[in-house]
Amino acid sequence: MQNSLKNIFPNFSPELISTIEENGSLQDFEAGTVLMRTGQYIKNTVLITKGKIKIYREGEDGGEFLMYYLQPGQACAISMICTAKSEKSQIMAKVVEDVSVMMIPLQMMDKWMMEHRSWYEFVIETYRSRFEEVLEVVDNIAFRSMDERLEFYLKRHSEACGCSEVKLSHQEIATELNTSREVISRLLKKMEQRGLVKLNRNQIELLK
Amino acid sequence: MQNSLKNIFPNFSPELISTIEENGSLQDFEAGTVLMRTGQYIKNTVLITKGKIKIYREGEDGGEFLMYYLQPGQACAISMICTAKSEKSQIMAKVVEDVSVMMIPLQMMDKWMMEHRSWYEFVIETYRSRFEEVLEVVDNIAFRSMDERLEFYLKRHSEACGCSEVKLSHQEIATELNTSREVISRLLKKMEQRGLVKLNRNQIELLK
DNA sequence: ACTTTACAGTAACATTTATCACACAAGGTT
DNA sequence: AACCTTGTGTGATAAATGTTACTGTAAAGT
């Protein structure tokens, strides 16, 4: 049981693992909890050990524009970046599936960067992969139309959960893509006609 | 003359400055040069000492969607991130005003992170500010319409050059916002009618 | 002075996306 | 069963943006 961190973060050195266990505090949050808001100061770096967190940008009108998901074995890049200078968050983080997270006090960040090679590499890789993901998001909204973005969104979702059924209402999808439910309904219908998906209530099955 | 690095990067320690001068190579590039392409492997971290570089995302149709500009005292975050693992670039970098850049071989990155506190802080701050900038870009395209984005674009430009005249053709603006020249012309005309700008050939003067 | 090129303005039209209005269906509750 | 809530389907219409086509005009080259 105590070795779970080791399994979830296989690249961490044994020493780092025990340092984390000594200094971090494991906390649970229920789905729906908002872990971080725009403008809030960040006090901890967050490692996810269970569940799923959604990182999004909030629009004035209540839009929840999806940036990416965080899953076990990952960390919040924003919290790492801001941590260094205790800066404000520019994003929102909401629990979408009950999570367990390891909270690391911000003072540890700098210290471990110097002392633990595996921590350093993890941080750099986290920056890299999240930056890349955000760039892909930019690509999508800058160059693609809604139908392509919807397909991409569904694909990413099914990859994230590892199954071909996406259990979301049209309204939820619309919110995350910052459009309206009607548009999503219509586009999904077209996709069904093209044989790409099968539609059910609160569930979309990807066929291809 | 030799102290110019010190002036441009005031937070670097004297030891770091001399290390950079020993290991880096100063190179000049003319406006128009493409320094980095999507898919290319990155071999150097780039510090800008003079001029201006545009970082953008390339669309299939030749769009050059602007992410941000790099100016003296700044560094390419992408090159730092990718350097660590010698990853591929996901962006394009083009010189817009003749530049001098200091090229740092990728092996130095990790080494200096451990040895030079001021390098470490510079790198973290570079990550943070660029991430923030990209998030702002996402905000704009996700939540704002073209007229607002255009205003934001012009404002950012005049801030970057420190003057109220933006010397760009409508076509160039359109390319960077991934829209068409006609749209930009229309919107600029409306802005002129609202008294926000004054239009001249190849130059837009911001009035407010 | 003449030609060529790049830049800018604008109308007409097409397409995409947003909004409004409403019907209906599935599940849960009383 | 009757009711309510939530989710879905669809037409009509509006607004924003993209496209085509054409005009004029300033600058640059010859």
Image: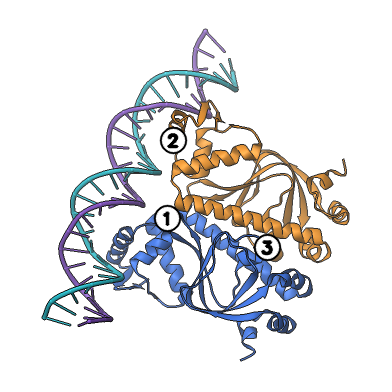
Chain colours: A blue, B orange, C purple, D cyan
Numbered mark located on residue A34 in the image: none
Query: What residue did someone put label 1 on?
Result: A61
What's the residue at 75%, 83% (across, down)? A15
Label 2 Cα neighbours within 10 Å, binned few <14 / some 14-19 / many ≥20: some
In the depicted structure, whether residue A141 falls above or below residue D20: below
Q: CA distance from mark 3 to mark 1?
A: 28 Å
Q: Do pointers 2 and 1 mark residues of a single chain? A: no
What kind of residue is marked 1?
Asp
Which residue has dot 3 on it?
A86
Q: Residues within 10 Å of mark 3 (few under 14, many from 20)?
A: some
In contact (CB < 8 Å): disc 2 and disc 1: no
Q: Is residue A167 left or right of residue A7?
A: left
What SS does tag 1 mark? loop
Residue B78: in sight, yes or no? no
- B133 vs B73, left or right, is left
**Which SS class for mark 2?**
helix
Circle 2 or circle 1, nearest the eye: 1
* Image point (75%, 59%), residue name: B121
Residue at horizontal 53%, vertical 32%? B169
Question: Mark 1 packing: few (<14 Cα in 10 Å), some, or many (20+)?
Answer: few
Residue A66 coordinates in the image, percent (x, y): 47, 63
Where disc 3 sits, the SS reads loop
Amino acid type at image mark 3? Ser
* Residue holding disc 2: B187
Q: Return the disc, 3 or 1, that comes first in the chain's sequence.
A: 1
Residue at (43% x, 59% y) in the render:
A63
Q: Nearer the viewer, residue B42 or A50?
A: A50
Check the picture and name the quadrant holding the C terminus of chain A: bottom left
Q: Position of residue B88 (x, y in %)?
A: 63, 60
CA gap, disc 2 and disc 3 = 40 Å
